[in-house]
Image (cartoon, helix red, strand yellow):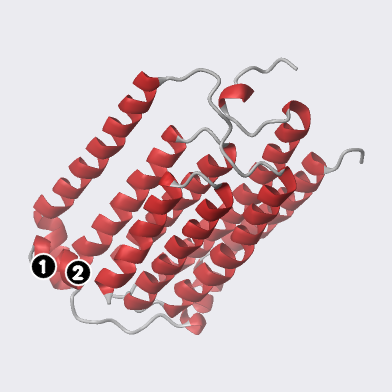
Amino acid sequence: MTGMDAILHGGLQGYLVVALLLFAIGLASVLLRRTLLLQFMGVELMLNAANVALLAFARYHGGDLQGTVFYLFIIAVAACEAAVGLALIIGLYRHRDTTDSDRAASLKQ
Amino acid sequence: MFLAFALITLLGALGMLLQKNIIVAGLFMVASFFGVAGLFVLLGNPVAAALQIIVYTGAILVLVLFVIMMLNSHEEEPAETSRPIQRWVSVVLSLALAAGAVKLVLASKGLQQLAEKGAPVPQGVTLQGVGAVLFANHLLGFEVAGLMLLAAMVGAVALTKRNL
């Protein structure tokens, strides 16, 4: 399958293109949105993009099981990140009464 | 099928990026995660698809929506200072990254060779196989992941509780 054909019918390149576009959208929402919660969701999208690429390569490497094992570890890291990150956002909201990352630019109270 | 799930994933993500209301943005994110789970099924990996739905669309989404409701700020706050140059630079950088990466993927000879070599459908991933590899080769990593989850749990409680 050549490039365009792979994108339309789901070859390796198709999955990689989806992963890359997902990563770019996640990056754009981290850069463009000011609400911390939306930036956090953008980070989750970027982690998911990495997962898609990883599992696509694992499938085209003869169904390698190591890919799924590392996907498991990525999910564990994402869960930790979600718990601590959201706790930090709640802490910030208590101190500053805002979830806008521009307004949290200074370390002073 | 591939195109349908890819479109669900990308349109969900795009909706999340453009949505003003944070709750609706969270729901768009779930649509995107469901699309990713569908892609995992198409990759012959039902284990990853099930994990994706349980952890992302189940646990992480509930956490996010719970925090949104708790904070009671559903709309993006008006900007303190508008920074048009920064916004345009971010848009251009993201678009350039996406276009450049897609161009590289489509032009790559090595990827095409890999796609042709791996084209025959391999044995589907089973939970049994994943478990065997996990506990045979990555036992230390598994234990560290467990410890890290415990640390994150304690940290989250310590950060949110007012007076311990």
Q: Position of residue A63 (x, y in %)?
A: 32, 75
Give the residue type that dot 2 points to: Gly
Marks 1 & 2, CB-CB < 8 Å contact: yes
Question: Which residue is identified by label 2?
Answer: A11
Q: Position of residue B141 (x, y in %)?
A: 57, 58
In the orientation shown, which residue stands out farthest toward the right?
B163
Residue at the spot 60% in from the left edge and 67% down from the top edge: B58
Q: Is residue B73 left or right of residue B92?
A: right
Residue closer to the observer: B125 or B29: B29
Quarter of the figure with the C terminus of chain B = top right
**What mark, if any, has residue A5 been given in the picture?**
1
Q: Quadrant of residue A100?
A: top right
Q: Position of residue B158 (x, y in %)?
A: 81, 42
Q: Is residue A105 left or right of residue B83?
A: right
Q: Position of residue B145 (x, y in %)?
A: 62, 57
Q: Give the number of the mark in front: 1 or 2.
A: 1
Q: Is residue A17 left or right of residue B56?
A: left
Q: Is residue A58 at all visible to an observer of this figure? A: no
Q: Quadrant of residue B111?
A: bottom left
Pointer 2 indicates a residue of which chain? A
Residue closer to the observer: A57 or B9: B9
The secondary element bearing badge 1 is classed as helix
Residue at the spot 71% in from the left edge and 32% down from the top edge: A92
Q: Is residue A20 at all visible to an observer of this figure? A: yes
Q: Look at the picture and state if B88 lies above or below B135.
A: above
Quarter of the figure with the N terminus of chain B = bottom left
Give the residue type that dot 1 points to: Asp
